[in-house]
């Protein structure tokens, strides 16, 4: 028993000497509880709704009020006849569009079914299904109150079958690319630390920047190859084709991977062992990419303080643009805000990582 106690005390002393590992052991469960508790929400509220009222009568305004007075929809735009409705979903202005045709009130008063069109962004199948359910209930209640039928015409864009695979596959691509780039880069540099080769770099003719580029460029190529394999598998196995420009998709992915490689380099400057580098790489890449990127759980459902934190997660911006290019065929210029965020993240990570790592090999 005494020998066991001696070994146990020795292990406790070793853990206490490594505050980072102790923080991960004690703080990670609490952090995961908070993130899962707030991020995981399957409720859909305050859906951005565009309303095109071509009738402009009291009856049409009452129908719009039915949607607005619920907690499910918020009017985000009022497009005019002739406006490009699809552009509203591509630019993320609206998730759904209510179109009330001219003659809506006349048909109601005549006792005939009044047509109403409801367009939904089906890129996120689960959210689209919920939105359609809300619209069904609201239109049914309106028809029941008036004792007059409303001919409801739903239409789902980008994903008519409401297949969740079309939503999840681009998300998986973002998560896997982040994990691959961060983990491979961090482990590669830390491996050199453990072998003591960083000491040799200091007396060799190679500069710190050359060393960093030589270590990261191969993983950039490997990550791009992984992206190509994912896209090929998505096409062959799930029938998901890229509707947008492959060249724009390549540029977007290069920007995303540049930030991910910079993050991996930054992790390598903190970790002293491959085991610790592996843990830290998972912590800063996989968990945020799953929980805080909109990959599975809608960011709009999170509290404001958590939504603010998601702005530091590059996968959040990459997935929005990626789904737009792949599923909607939207031009990349539509997602200039997301591209700018990815560029800023990549610049910050590269500057921080190269400065810290250059000092180690200088």
Image (cartoon, grey):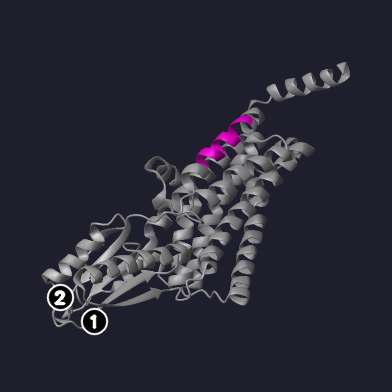
Residue 334, given in percent of the width and then of the height, sits at 36, 65
Residue 211, given in percent of the width and then of the height, sits at 66, 46
Image quadrant holding the C terminus, namely top right
Identify which residue is drawn at 48% across, 59% down.
319
**Relative to 112, 259 lies left or right:** right
**Front in this rendered view, residue 28 or 346:** 28
**Relative to 110, 355 lies left or right:** right
Q: Which mark is residue 55?
A: 2
Image quadrant holding the N terminus, namely top right
Write down the quadrant of residue 87 in the picture.
Answer: bottom left
The residue tagged with tag 1: helix, strand or loop? loop
Q: Which residue is mark 1?
A: 113
- Mark 1 and mark 2 lie on one chain; the one further toward the N terminus is 2
Write down the quadrant of residue 331 in the picture.
Answer: bottom left
Q: Point out the stretch of residues depicted in magenta.
A: 26-35
Magenta stretch contains residue 133: no
**Front in this rendered view, residue 157 or 43:** 43
Q: Which mark is residue 335?
A: none
At label 1, counting other C-alpha atoms closer than 10 Å, the crowd grade (few under 14, some 14-19, many 20 or more) is some
CA separation, marks 1 and 2?
Answer: 15 Å
Residue 288, given in percent of the width and then of the height, sits at 54, 47
Q: Is residue 269 depicted above or below 105 in this figure?
A: above
């Amino acid at each position: 028993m005494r020998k066991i106690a001696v070994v146990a005390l020795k292990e406790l002393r070793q853990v206490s000497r490594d505050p980072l590992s102790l923080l991960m052991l004690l703080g990670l469960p609490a952090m995961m509880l908070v993130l899962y508790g707030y991020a995981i929400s399957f409720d859909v509220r305050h859906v951005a709704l565009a309303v095109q009222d071509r009738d402009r009568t009291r009856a049409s305004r009452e129908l719009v009020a039915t949607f607005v007075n619920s907690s499910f929809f918020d009017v985000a735009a009022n497009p005019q006849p002739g406006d490009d409705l699809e552009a509203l979903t591509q630019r993320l202005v609206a998730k759904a569009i209510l179109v009330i045709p001219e003659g809506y009130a006349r048909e109601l008063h005549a006792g005939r079914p009044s047509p109403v069109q409801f367009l939904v962004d089906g890129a996120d199948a689960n959210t689209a299904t919920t939105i359609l359910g809300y619209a069904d209930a609201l239109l049914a209640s309106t028809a029941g109150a008036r004792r007059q039928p409303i001919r409801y015409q739903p239409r789902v864009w980008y994903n008519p079958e409401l297949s969740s695979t079309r939503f999840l596959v681009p998300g998986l691509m973002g998560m896997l690319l982040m994990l691959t780039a961060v983990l491979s880069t961090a482990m590669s540099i830390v491996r050199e630390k453990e072998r003591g080769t960083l000491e040799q770099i200091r007396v060799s003719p190679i500069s710190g920047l050359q060393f960093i580029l030589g270590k990261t460029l191969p993983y950039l190529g490997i990550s791009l190859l992984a992206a190509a394999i994912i896209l090929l598998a998505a096409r062959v196995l799930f029938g998901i084709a890229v509707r947008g420009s492959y060249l724009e998709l390549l540029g977007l992915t290069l920007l995303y991977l540049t930030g991910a490689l910079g993050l991996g380099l930054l992790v390598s400057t903190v970790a002293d062992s491959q085991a610790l580098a592996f843990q830290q790489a998972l912590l800063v890449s996989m968990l945020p990419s799953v929980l805080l990127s909109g990959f599975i759980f809608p960011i709009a459902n999170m509290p404001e303080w958590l939504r603010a934190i998601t702005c530091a997660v590059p996968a959040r911006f990459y997935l929005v643009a990626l789904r737009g290019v792949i599923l909607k065929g939207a031009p990349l210029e539509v997602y200039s805000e997301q591209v700018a965020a990815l560029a800023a993240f990549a610049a910050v990570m590269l500057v921080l990582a190269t400065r810290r790592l250059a000092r180690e090999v200088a």
